[in-house]
Image: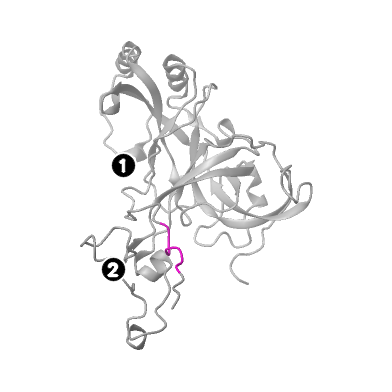
Amino acid sequence: MVRHHQPRKGSVAFSPRKRAAKETPRIKSWPQEDESKLLGLAGYKVGMTHAMMVDNDKNSPTSGMEVFTPVTILEVPPPVVVMGVRAYEKTTYGLKVITEVLADNLDKELSRKVSLPKEYNQSEAIAKIQEALEETVDIKVLVHTNPKVTSVPKKKPEIFECGIGGKTAEEKLNAALELLGNEVKATDVFSDGQYVDSIATTKGKGFQGPVKRWGGIRIQYGKAARSSKKRHIGSMGPWTPSRTMWTVPQAGQMGYHKRTEYNKKILKIGDSSEVDAVNPDGGFIKYGLVKNDYIMVKGSLPGPSKRLVILRKAMRAKGKSNDAPQINYISTKSKQGV
């Protein structure tokens, strides 16, 4: 009898598939930009709808034609504040923080997340970070969100580290100190038609079996098929080596993983006066209405509604066109199924 072998079920590229340590993702890599401004921004995932736009990709077979496009809406409230500046030095164990500077006018809601200093001298901290400029190899800023102005039912802000552009550490530091304590809008970082990378924690699905988790097939013949065990794996691996290998598809945690999706195109950035252009009748399911500035991204983004999604300037967008497409229609019909 001839045996036909087929590829394994499910990719092992993201193993081990364990739960993310934090819901707010940590970004370790940032692109190198000469322009002194933030390299990323965060928003709350609202939901999806569809739009009709003119395809402006010259290499697309539908170039110049009006096409149907699924889009994702992110709410990016303007009070995204730069709350701190960090200086990093290079050591044998990687980059380590030398010192940091905090803003004076910190939001009181931050006390829900971290312990705020009662007595803080900002001028001394700035002098210390400027003295350590010779050992500094990189400057990053701390940014916090303000979810209480959105439809997300919480007040505790998220804090994440964001890269900043500049040719040298001194340029980055000067730009960061100018932004310290100030609000940043989406239009200050991105523009229509720009490519970005999305980083977020995916939707959690709990403990799942090998069929759903790895895409295996149910047992359809043999003695096992006549029993109640149809959704288990057929083999735990070879006799040698005499142990269960990590590549064997087994049950375990599925979802709630940190994932990065590259080259997502921003179709439109709207302010709070244009929310009626995207708000459907009855609001978005499991979110509500968009009240602040928003970003409309082509395609889907990781995570469920209300999940924080960080957009970073694209690191692999070589050869991509940043021209903004012409949008002729955005669906605002009810998503409630009526």
- Residue at 34% from the left image edge and 56% from the top image edge: 17
Which residues are drawn in magenta?
5-11
| N-term mark: 2 or 1 | 1
- Residue at 28% from the left image edge and 68% from the top image edge: 236
Using the image as rendered, state which of residue 277 and residue 18 is in the foreground.
18
- The residue where tag 1 is placed is 113
Q: Quadrant of the N terminus?
A: bottom left
Residue 159 is covered by the magenta coloring: no
Which numbered circle lies on residue 236? 2
Q: Is residue 31 above or below residue 214?
A: above
Task: Report whether 42 appears left or right of 269.
Answer: left
**Residue type of the residue flagged with mark 2:** Met
Task: Report whether 182 appears left or right of 280.
Answer: left
User: In the figure, residue 214 lies in which quadrant?
Assistant: bottom left
Place of residue 78 in the rendered image (x, y in percent of width and height, measured from the top left): 52, 37
Please state the total of marks drawn on the protein image: 2
